[in-house]
Image (cartoon, rainbow, N blue to C red):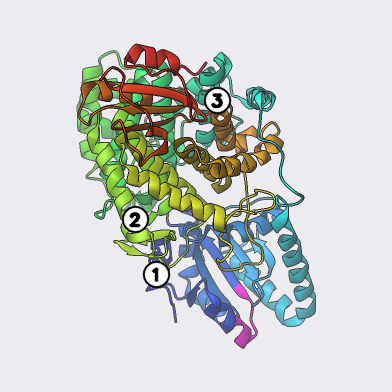
């Protein structure tokens, strides 16, 4: 019996009709394995994963393979986006054992959840020195039935090793001090060593968008004036925006580029990438006035609203890389996005197609004579470019579209809320702020339990069962703080504070200040996951540090600021050695070193002077600056308390640690005071 039909995860539902008798992760599955005396096959993936689809079609839909699997194992399927804790624990084991990782992740466990054999994708027949999946199943079964004591010994040793890693960042009386000037400068120097001078980005192929590192570089430039930091950020942003990783027709970014030139992407589009990159490009525009950056922000925002927004107001997780190829009817990666010269001519006519071929570098950059569209240089005729782009977009909408993973993840929606709120306020797009507010309302209505705890996911307005992890609390709080900054509604600040209090209570090691990815009362795995380094998104650890620091700047809370400082100690240790993987922590450290600046804007609601000062404050590049806006005499928000008008006019106060300069009613004066240096 396949038990996935009742799941809320689109990934699990993709496997609900498999002949494999899948179980969702839970004690029932492991109890069944114990009862039958068989091992557990743990298969972990996600809905937009190309190779997950391949392995499902080749092996999990095969009756003979499924029959053997059902007879000799208990099969458990996990969506890594619903259970990042399960994924993190066993991926660490996979990487330690094999030297690599990826999805689908394939792990064999004892009924006690201890892993003993690892892999990722396995083909249906032996290939390139890799065993077939059936051979793996048979080998594991033979070892389990014939050498059980040996398997148990290996599993116990691996489980013990993983468990001992649980406290690696929480030993002694505390972590190091937060990064100072020398460490932040050293991180920039280290980044220059791996920076691709010719093509932007860091390292070689494949190239992932370094969103958190770019935010650090922009903040470092704002604080110090470092042209090297700004140049690395600017050149990387331009290269990504001009390459095939950016959707030149519909806006939005793909997951990564498979090459070093940003030409051919892995075509899945993730909410988190687009939220993070939208904010980076917005901050680049704020720092430089770069019009290309502004265009990318607006096009990416429009993509989010058009293709990822759910009927309930949240944002779906991803679009698949694969879709049906109209020519063959079979699913193929990139079929929705690639073009041939002939297809362009059919849509545009010969003359405009020739222009499009040159404009978008249609030279067979992808597969079977197709090309991923790029924009190597600005169009000479912007109006004609917009017309061509519009026509291609209209025709493309008639192609079979990639499937959408429509589950709503709290953390990633928090990132989107922050990006949309800021973009809407800075670029005069109130619809973006409204979209951010609606997504936040969904998180409150569906993801927040009566006890104030967050649930990780929802789908179709119904909450999933999985508890929120650290990044859910931190990124949702970050989104709520952004909504308060742009709208001045104190309830957002209060909600952020309630979430951050739970972070301190349930996720923080009181002795050391280290943070865990799961709460102290969450399901206990073979180890409690903990990771201060960034992956595709900011680490929950440093995301929490950033939100704690911002909340402390609004409220004057020494407790929250101290927690942020203690959490950043690990960045001193890792930042200069591995800045590409500690970008968000370095960005938060820039804010800490700058103060951060606290701006209180007071004046009557609807007053033009207050609105102008508020916008000037939001446009400041000062790292991590917080902005409070309200009426004089407001006591609900501590930063606004005791801030009178200036000669009867709206006024702005620039402060650090609640020690403020004299107020100003002049926008130009406020802008000068808020310069990063």
Of marks 1 and 3, which one's residue comes earlier in the chain?
A: 1
Number of other residues with Cα within 10 Å of mark 1, as a class: few under 14, some 14 to 19, many 20 or more: some
Residue indicated by mark 1: 7
Number of other residues with Cα within 10 Å of mark 3, as a class: few under 14, some 14 to 19, many 20 or more: many
User: Which mark's residue is nearer the viewer, 1 or 3?
Assistant: 3
Residue 488 left/right relative to 409: left
Q: Secondary structure at mark 2?
A: helix
Q: Secondary structure at mark 3?
A: helix
User: Which mark's residue is nearer the viewer, 1 or 2?
Assistant: 2
Q: Position of residue 640 (x, y in %)?
A: 37, 33
Image mark for residue 397: none
Residue at position x 62%, y 52% in the image:
101
Is residue 12 or residue 281 the one in the foreground? 281
Residue at position x 58%, y 52% in the image:
102
The CA distance from mark 1 to mark 2 is 22 Å
Residue indicated by mark 3: 594
The quarter of the picture where the N terminus appears is: bottom left
Whether 660 is among the magenta residues is no
Q: Which residues are magenta?
A: 32-40
Residue indicated by mark 2: 444
Q: Position of residue 669 (x, y in %)?
A: 38, 12
Residues marked 1 and 3 touching at CB (< 8 Å): no
């Amino acid at each position: 019996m396949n038990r996935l039909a009742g799941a809320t995860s689109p990934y699990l539902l993709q496997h609900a009709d498999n002949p494999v008798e899948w179980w969702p992760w839970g004690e029932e599955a492991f109890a069944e394995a114990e009862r039958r005396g068989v091992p557990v096959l743990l298969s972990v993936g996600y809905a937009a994963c190309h190779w997950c689809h391949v392995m499902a079609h080749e092996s999990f839909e095969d009756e003979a393979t499924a029959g053997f699997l059902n007879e000799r194992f208990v099969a458990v399927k996990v969506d890594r986006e619903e259970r990042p804790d399960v994924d993190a624990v066993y991926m660490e084991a996979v990487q330690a054992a094999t030297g690599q990782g990826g999805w689908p992740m394939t792990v064999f466990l004892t009924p006690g959840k201890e892993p003993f054999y690892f892999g990722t994708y396995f083909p249906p027949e032996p290939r390139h020195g890799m065993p077939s999946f059936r051979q793996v199943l048979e080998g594991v079964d033979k070892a389990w039935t014939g050498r059980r004591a040996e398997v148990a010994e290996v599993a116990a040793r691996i489980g013990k090793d993983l468990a001992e890693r649980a406290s690696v960042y929480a030993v002694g009386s505390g972590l190091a001090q937060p990064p100072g000037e020398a460490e932040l400068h050293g991180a920039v120097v280290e980044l220059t060593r791996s920076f691709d001078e010719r093509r932007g980005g860091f390292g070689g192929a494949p190239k992932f968008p370094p969103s958190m590192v770019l935010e650090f570089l922009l903040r470092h430039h704002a604080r110090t004036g470092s042209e090297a930091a700004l140049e690395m950020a600017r050149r990387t942003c331009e290269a990504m925006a001009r390459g095939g990783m950016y959707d030149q027709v519909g806006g939005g970014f793909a997951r990564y580029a498979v090459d070093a030139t940003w030409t051919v992407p892995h075509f899945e589009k993730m909410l988190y990438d687009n939220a993070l990159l939208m904010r980076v490009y917005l901050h680049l525009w704020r720092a430089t006035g770069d019009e290309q950056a502004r265009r990318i922000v607006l096009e990416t925002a429009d993509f989010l609203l058009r293709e990822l927004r759910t009927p309930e107001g949240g944002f779906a997780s991803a679009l698949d890389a694969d879709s049906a190829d109209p020519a063959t009817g079979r699913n193929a990666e990139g079929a929705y996005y690639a073009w041939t010269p002939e297809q362009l001519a059919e849509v545009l006519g010969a003359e405009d197609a020739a222009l499009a071929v040159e404009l978008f570098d249609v030279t067979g950059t992808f597969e079977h004579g197709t090309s991923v569209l790029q924009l190597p240089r600005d169009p000479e005729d912007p109006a004609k470019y917009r017309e061509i782009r519009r026509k291609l977009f209209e025709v493309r909408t008639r192609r079979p579209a990639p499937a959408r993973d429509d589950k709503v993840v709290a953390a990633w929606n928090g990132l989107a809320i922050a990006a949309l709120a800021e973009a809407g306020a800075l670029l005069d797009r109130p619809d973006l702020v409204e979209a951010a507010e609606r997504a936040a309302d969904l998180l409150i209505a569906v993801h927040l339990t009566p006890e104030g705890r967050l649930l990780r996911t929802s789908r179709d307005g119904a909450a999933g069962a999985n508890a929120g992890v650290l990044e859910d609390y931190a990124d949702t709080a970050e989104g709520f703080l952004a909504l308060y900054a742009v709208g001045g509604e104190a309830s957002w600040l209060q909600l952020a504070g309630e979430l951050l209090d739970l972070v301190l209570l349930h996720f923080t090691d009181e002795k050391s200040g280290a943070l865990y990815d799961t709460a102290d009362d969450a399901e206990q795995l073979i180890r409690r996951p903990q990771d201060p380094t960034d992956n595709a998104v900011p680490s929950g650890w440093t995301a929490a540090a950033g939100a704690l620091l911002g909340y402390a700047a609004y409220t004057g809370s020494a407790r929250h600021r101290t927690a942020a400082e203690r959490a950043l100690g690990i960045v001193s240790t890792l930042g200069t050695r591995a800045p590409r993987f500690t970008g968000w922590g370095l960005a938060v450290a820039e804010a800490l070193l700058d103060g951060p600046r606290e701006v209180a804007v007071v004046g009557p609601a609807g007053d033009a002077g207050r609105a102008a000062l508020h916008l000037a404050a939001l446009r400041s590049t000062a790292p991590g600056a917080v902005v409070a806006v309200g009426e004089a005499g407001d006591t609900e928000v501590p930063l606004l308390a005791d801030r009178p008008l200036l000669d009867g006019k709206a006024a702005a106060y620039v402060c650090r640690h609640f020690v403020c300069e004299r107020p100003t009613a002049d926008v130009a004066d406020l802008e000068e005071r808020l310069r990063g240096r």
